[in-house]
Amino acid sequence: MDPSASAENAANDSSLEPYPPTFAIRLSQSGDSEANFRTEDDPEDPDQRSNVIQRRGIFYADCFCTDIVHGYYSADPNSNDLASVIVLKFRFEPLEQNHRIKKVDIQVTFLPKNNEGCEPWIDRMHPEGFFSVQPTTQRETVNTSAGGKVGANATGVEVGAELKREKTVERDTSDATTVQGFILTEGRNYGKPNSVSWILRENKTTKTGVPTSMQAAILLKRIDLSKFQAHFTLKIYPNWLATALSFMKSNPRDDPVTFDPRRKPTNRLQVYDTDDLGNPEKLKLKDLSDVTVTTIVNDAVKQKKPENK
């Protein structure tokens, strides 16, 4: 069979849509020799790299640390708790037509580096909970019918007519792109939460894919100045044809991101009060978070002024 014809048939077969295979982008502690499929620490500056992951194939996916801030959790002189604020920005986009991403699973787990020092834990993060993004409503018309036969038997043969009653119902159906955020305990069944997770799902009615970008903010608590690491796992669920044709590397081994609490704050999004990071009035994680489905550029047509001769 012609492979191109097979792929075309698969693209048109809606029965395959609800059951797509998946591929995973995993960032683990050990590395491999395939440098083209890895995101590594800079040997000259290995801590707190900003580019967590970058992948390009049929899809483009990346994650960057937008802000990294270390300090004290409370300005109360009787409190010795330390804190860190980490703002992450994810991006997911198809690079080919007729391909889209239906769902993305993200998980970030924080652990002490080389199992030395104390493990940080999650105090709060945003987005957390269930969020509807760009909800849609459309009108549907549903036809239903009920019927039966009426007639008489003559010499064993039934004769008669089919009676049917039809009913037309119009209704509005609502759907939306969704984002769910969770705080979790990963790798053990006890203790304080050390992991966060987000699930992005497309609008099943419009089938327009997941949001193209999401920015999320995490507030960690710590009790010492030891370095710690973030281990990332991304699972991407594309539409069926995109999965069949995708050549993105599955399960690449990337370096985890190492954080050094002795470093100065990056202060890219705002100037943080490093002596009172746990104050919800001063640090509003919601203001540091964002979800974007599509960016529309207005006034994109510009007229060039004639050059003076």
Image: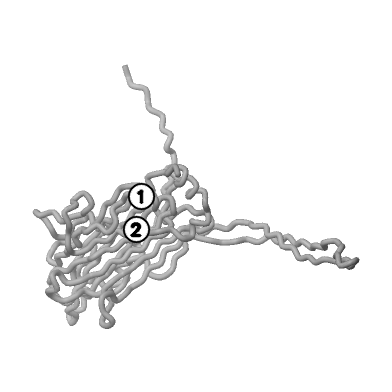
Extreme residue in the front direction:
155
Foreground: 123 or 145? 145
**SS of the residue under disc 1:** loop
Residue 254, located in which quarter of the rendered image?
bottom left
Percent x, y of residue 79: 19, 80
Q: Which mark is residue 246?
A: 1
On screen, residue 270 above or below 278: above
For disc 2, the neighbor class at 10 Å (few under 14, some 14 to 19, many from 20) is: some
Q: What's the residue type where badge 2 is placed?
A: Phe
Verify CB contact (< 8 Å) between mark 1 and mark 2.
Answer: yes
Residue at 44 percent across and 42 percent down: it is 2
Extreme residue in the top direction:
309
First in sequence, mark 1 or 2: give its number.
Answer: 2
Judged left or right of residue 117, residue 273 is right
Judged left or right of residue 303, residue 166 is right
Q: CA distance from mark 1 to mark 2?
A: 9 Å
For disc 2, the marked residue is 23
Q: How many labels were placed on the picture?
A: 2
